[in-house]
Structure formats: structure tokens, C-alpha cells
Amino acid sequence: MDMNSEYRKYLSNIKKNNILVHVTRIIILLLIVILWEYLSSHNIINSFIYSSPSKIIKTIISLYQTNNLFNHIWITIYETIISFVLATLLGTIIAIILWYSKFLYRVMDPYLTVINSLPKVALGPVIIILSGANIKSIIVMALLISLIITITNVYSGFVNTDKNMIKLMNSFQASKYRILKYLIIPYNYHVIISSLKINVGMSMVGVIMGEFLVSKQGIGYLINYGSQVFNLNLVFAGILLLIIVSYLMYLMVLLLEKTLIRDN
Amino acid sequence: MNSILEIENISKNYYSKDKETTALLDISMNIYPGEFLVIVGPSGCGKSTLLNIIGGIDKESSGVIRGNKDIRIGYMLQSDSLFPWLTILDNALLGLKIKNDLTKENINYVKKLLKTYGLSEFINSYPKELSGGMRQRVALIRTLAMKPDILLLDEPFSALDYQTRLKVCDDVYEIIKEENKTVIMITHDIGEACSLADRIVVLSERPGKIKKIFNIKWDKKGTPFQNRMNKEFSTYYDMVWKEIDGYE
Ligand SMILES: Nc1ncnc2c1ncn2[C@@H]1O[C@H](COP(=O)(O)OP(=O)(O)OP(=O)(O)O)[C@@H](O)[C@H]1O
Ligand SMILES: [Mg+2]
């Protein structure tokens, strides 16, 4: 097909605009880094408290040299993946059970509301005592944060399934199980997938919180340990790693979403 | 002629915390094999309720419906309710799948129906790619797939614009006659009722009772669209309209 020149101009304008946005973003980042480095190397700000980009990099390199870097990163990723997969799976299963029994839902409803509004970090000490100071506590913490919201989201998707489609299934005398299998689950597929996406962020919060409380490993531990020994370089290095890991996890889930949802 | 279904003294009440609604009161009528029965009546008079009871998705408060228990009833709801994640073929096969009746023979029957009614090139498409009229046809085929003896249609054309409606109405009528089904249909459209029906049942305002039954006969019976041109049409139209107009 022959593209007319106005249309081509329109496209190239969009492209130019996109490039400009990217370049501006990078410049802002570079300016911040350079300014930060400049201020601390000329002792305008206290580099002991505010650290500096070069010191952060050095800290990360030394973590790498003592063979700890990828270990810490991996532990945090591992805990997050377990938590968000578990939260989505358990949340969906519990939502299914509640959908089966309206009675059970009515009984559980206020409990869910109360647990949901409770700041979970307050339960930290209890979790440690019950699960021990180990990875189990961290995952329980992350689950607490993301599970209830998953249940609520998925359940409300279930009960808001198109009434006419349910009526259609009833006109086939479909059993509750078949309604679930052939209508409710596929109808709410995207709800379940999108709660996977929400849960990545939530689980990350839970995992870092858990690592603050109990861990001897992971990025949360690095940050917490750094603050305890007043090594701010370590704290900032941890935060930088966390930003990178969060972004990677986000990309991973985006990819997962793309492969799971074939858009019909 | 022997009836295929006998509806005897059906009443239906709905209850909520603060009130009781009588939707249907003492409905009795016979349905005869091969006939096209149309139910009209004011909004909220219980037409859908009656169809739901006949179709077995709602329970009558009192009364009975008699019929051979082998009689199969197919219900085509007002909205097409095609599942967007299933292909047209899978949508048309849904009822059979739910009923565990996906035999090779049945699948071929559905494919044949889709082909006959102009949908063969869309078998592997998804519902959003179809026009409203085509979707309506798929919904009808999904119902026909289970080889029902009696077909219940709740305002099957209401989602369509007037032009399409006349066309789809003819299409659907042809399909139904071809497959030789007994039909009970609800509509708000008097013209539609008169052009399609062998009999028209007029229900009263709520609680719905049978107010009047009209027999529709033509000198030269044609498709619904042709019937609209017949000389008797306006007479029937006026008769039904007067009966319904009495409410306002
Ligand atoms: N599940 C229900 N619970 C309570 N009341 C109901 C229920 N279903 C229907 N009704 C009431 O029963 C009456 C008849 O409803 P129905 O849907 O059968 O009317 P209809 O004749 O089909 O109306 P329309 O022409 O608007 O479709 C209405 O007053 C409605 O409010
Ligand atoms: Mg209705």
C-alpha cells in the first residue's frame, strides 16, 4: 500500500516526540547523579550521611567480590515469586470456595474487612513467634498483605459475572461446578491475571518488611543491616538494587501477562 | 390435535423482605405441536417469568405443567450471551458440552446448521467479529443444537435495529420452520407478533393473567415480512393493539 506523505510525516513526528521524551528522562537522571556526586565529593553535603553514586557503586562491587551480591538479590526475588504465586493461587481458591457458599461468604465478610484494614506490619512479632525467624515468616508476611486483597478482587469478579450468561448456563441445567469451569473462571481470567500483577508489588512490600524483621539475607536485610551499623552506602546500595529488582519483576509479569492473555 | 404441553393454573409469587409480588396468576393454556405462539403484554406483567418457568430455570408457586417428560425444551434468552472467549463453533456447541452430549453426530449437525445459515466462514471467528444479526443466529443455533421440541424465545430481536430486525426475523422464522419446531415467543412489537404468530396470547397487567387469545390465519401465508403486506395484517394489528391499549 502507498502511504501518503502526510501520514508518514505524522508517524515520524510521533517517533521524534518519543525519542525526545526518552532523552529528557535520561538527562534528568544523569543530572541528578552528577549533581549528587559533585556535592558529596566537594563536601557540600556530608557523604557519610548522603553517600554518593560512586560510593554506592563501590559498595555494590565489594558485595559482588565477597560473593554475596547475587545471593541477596536472588533470595529477595525467590521470596517474592513464591509469595505472589501463592497469594494468587490461594486467593483464587478461597474466592472459589466463598463463591460456592454464599453462607460462608457472609460469615467471613467482616473478618476479611478487618484483616484487610489492619496494618500487617503490626503482626510481625506474632508471625515471627509462630513461624520462626526464617523464610517462612517472610512469606507469611507477604501473603498477609496480598492474599486478602486477591480474595476480594477475584470474588467480586466472580459475583459480577454477566447475569445473562449465568441464566444461559441455568437454561442448560448446568451444575454449579460446570458454571464455574465453563463460565466463571474463563470470564474472570483477566481478573485473576491482573491480580497476579498487583500481587507482585504487594508481595515485594511484604518480603522487604519481612526481611527487615527476621532475615539474614536479601535486599531488605542489606538495607536494615546498613542502617543498624550506620553504613549509609550499604543502605543506598540496597535501595538501588531494590529499584532494579522491582523493575525486573514488573517486566517479568508484563511478559507473563502477554503470554497468558491472548487477546481475542 | 393433541397438545405437546399443558400449562395448568400456574401462579408465581416473588417475595422480598417487605413485600410479596404476584407476577403470574392462574395461567392455563395448551401448546400444540408445530405452532408458533406469541405472548404479548405490558412491561413487567410476567412474560419472562412464564417462560422461565416453562424453561425450568424458575419454579412455579402453584399449578403444574404437563407434558411428555422426554420433551426437550430449548430456551433462547433475550441477550445472545455469546462467550467472547469461545469461537463461534464452540459457542454453538456450548449447550451440548454442558449436557455431555458432544457426539460426532451432534457436532456435524451444528456445523451443518452454521453452514446452512450463512455462518460457515465464521466458524473459527470470535463473537466480536460478528454483526448483531449474525450473533442472534448463532444464539439460535446454540439452542437448536440440542434438538429441542419446544423453543422458547424471549424478545429475540429486541437488540436489533428495525431494518436488521425485519431481516433476522425472516431468517429465524425460516430456520424454525425448516427444523419444524414448536415455538413460544415473547415480543413487545405488535407487528412482529402478528406477522409471525399462529396464535397470540395477550397477558394483562401484573399480576399477569390471560386476557385474550387471537388465532391468526392468512389467505396466503408467507414469510413474516410478506405477511406484513397481506390484507389481513392491519386488522390483526388493530385487534391486538386495542387489547393492549386498554392498559394505558
Ligand atoms: N427474581 C425476582 N424477584 C422478585 N421479583 C421479580 C423477580 N423476577 C421478576 N420479578 C417481578 O415480577 C414481575 C414480572 O417480571 P417479568 O420479568 O416476568 O416481566 P416481563 O413481562 O418479562 O417484563 P418485560 O416486558 O419488561 O421484560 C415484575 O414486576 C418483576 O419486578
Ligand atoms: Mg421480560
Image (cartoon, rainbow, N blue to C red):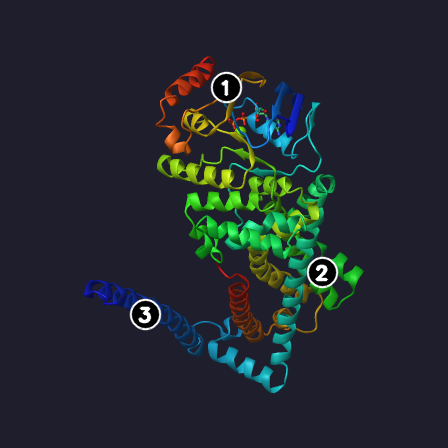
Which residue is under mark 1?
B214
Cβ–Cβ under 8 Å for marks 1 and 2: no
For the residue pair A238 and A154, the one nearer the viewer reads as A154
The residue type indicated by label 1 comes to Phe
Label 2: few (<14), some or many (≥20) within 10 Å? Answer: many
Work out whether A106 lies above or below A91: above
Quarter of the picture holding the N terminus of chain A: bottom left
**Residue A19 has which mark?**
3
**Residue A252 has which mark?**
none
Q: Position of residue A39 (x, y in %)?
A: 42, 74
**Secondary structure under the numbered disc 1 in the rendered image:** strand
Q: Residue at x 51, y 24 (%)?
A: B199
Q: Position of residue B176 (x, y in %)?
A: 51, 39
**Does the beta carbon of the residue at mark 1 sit less than 8 Å from ligand 1?**
no
Q: Position of residue A58 (x, y in %)?
A: 53, 82
Which residue is under mark 2?
A140
The residue type indicated by label 2 comes to Val
> Quick check: do tags 1 and 3 share a chain?
no
> Quick check: do tags 1 and 2 share a chain?
no
State which mark lies toward you, 1 or 3. 1
State which mark lies toward you, 2 or 3. 3
